[in-house]
Image (cartoon, rainbow, N blue to C red):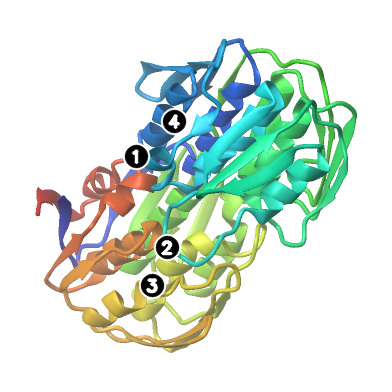
Amino acid sequence: MDQLVIRGGRPLAGTVTASGAKNAALPLMASCLLTSEPLRLENVPRLMDVRTMARLLRHVGAEVTEEGPASLRLQAEAPGCPEAPYDLVKTMRASVLVLGPLVARLGRARVSLPGGCAIGPRPINLHLMGLERLGARIRLSHGYVEAETDGLTGARIAFDLQTVTGTENLMMAAALARGTTTLEHAACEPEVADLASLLNAMGAKIEGAGSATITIHGVPALRGATHRTIPDRIETGTLAVAAAITGGTVTIEECRPVHLEAVLVKLEESGAALTTGPGTLTVRGASRSRAVNVRTQPFPGFATDMQAQMMALMAVASGRSVITEAVFENRFMHVNELLRMGADITTAGNTAVVQGVPGLLGAPVMATDLRASASLVLAALAARGTTTVSRIYHLDRGYEALEEKLRLLGADIERVKA
C-alpha cells in the first residue's frame, strides 16, 4: 500500500494541465453499452475508477482498448452478460451507471448494489423509481438489483432530490425508449451536460441537459461517435486551493473556470487573486487567507467534492469560518486527521466551525475517502515539517498523478511503499 511523504512550507509556482473529468468519463464509458458501433473517448484520465469501469464493461461483453495515453476505444457489439457482480461494483458507486444502458439495450440487467467512498448513504432508489416509470420491472434480491422489461416507454419522471448518477442513468435508458421522457428536478452538473453531448452525437435527441428539466425523445438505435471528455473541475479546484494554501502562483491550463465559479468566488473572498483566460486559470495566493463561510449545494452551488479542500485552507486562514455540508452526511471524516496536524475545528451535525491557526505541523495521517485524501495533501503542503499520508488508494481513484503535478510546481512530495 502506497503512502505520500510531503515536506511542506514551499509556495507552489508554475503551470500545470488539468486532466479529464473522472465524473464525466465514467458515464461516457457506460454509454458504449447503448450501441453496437465503436465509441472513441479522448482526454480520459488514467485512474483506478476508470480501470474498474473498463473491467466491468469487459465483463458484460464490451471491448475496451487504449488507443493512446488518454484515449479509449469502446465497443459493445454483442454484450452477452447483463450482470455487474459485487466484486467489481463494491469499490465504485458509479458502477450503477451500467444499469440503465443494459436494461434499454438488452431488456434485462442484474447489478450489485454499489459501494464507493463511505461519505453517507447515497441510495439508488431514484434510479429504480425512474426505471419503473419507464416500464421496467424491478426486484431486489440478495444485494442485487434485477431489472427486466419488454420495452421501455417514455414517461414524466420527477426526482424528489437532485441525483447526478440517477439523472445520467435514466437519460441513457430513455434515449432508447419509445416516446418522450421528461426528467424534472434533474441534476445540472457539467458532467450531465457532457454525457448528453455525447449521446446527441450518437444520434440521441436530448434537450435541456445542464438545466433542471431534461427532455429525451427516444430513438430506435444509436451509432458510434468520437467525444472529448471535459476537464476535471474538482482537480482544477484542488490545484487552485494548493496555490492559495501555500501562498504561491499557479496557472492551470486546459480547464474550464466556468464550471467552478462558486469555488472561485470563495477563493477570491479569502484573498486569492484570480485571472481567467480561454481555458486557463491563474491563482495567486495571499500571504495568509481570510476566513470565509461555505455551504455546499448541488451545481451551480459550491461543490461538496471541494468541501474538504476548502476546510484545509480555512484551517490556516485568519479568523473563524463556518462550513455547512448540505449534500452528504458523514463527510467530515477528514476533520480528525486535520486536528492531528494542529487545526482547530469543531463539528456539530452537518456544520464545522474552523478557527484558523497560524500554521499546521506535519504528522502521520490517514485518508478516509477520495476528497478527504486531497485535503490532507493540501494541509501537508502548507504544514511545517513532514507529513505522511496513508491509504492514498482513495486519492488514486480520482486524481491522475497528483503528486507528479504538485512536484512539477515545486512541492517536496514523493510516493513510497508503506
Percent x, y of residue 68: 37, 17
Q: Is residue 299 left or right of residue 338?
A: right
Q: Distance between the residues labelled 1 and 4?
A: 12 Å
- Residue type at mark 2: give it: Ala
Front disc: 1 or 3 = 1
- Residue at 20%, 55% in the rendered image: 411
Percent x, y of residue 88: 40, 38
Percent x, y of residue 50: 41, 35
Q: How far apart are marks 2 and 4 (CA)?
A: 21 Å
Q: Which of marks 2 and 1 is nearer the N terminus?
A: 1
Front disc: 4 or 3 = 4
- Residue type at mark 3: give it: Leu
Pick the front one: 122 or 407: 122
Q: What element carries label 3?
A: helix
- Is 129 drawn above or below residue 301 in the view shown? above
- Residue type at mark 1: give it: Met
Residue 159 in view in this figure = yes
Front disc: 3 or 2 = 2
Identify residue for label 2: 118
Identify residue for label 4: 56
Q: Earlier in the sequence, mark 4 or mark 3?
A: 4
Crowdedness near tag 1: few (<14), some (14–19) or many (≥20) residues, C-alpha within 10 Å: many
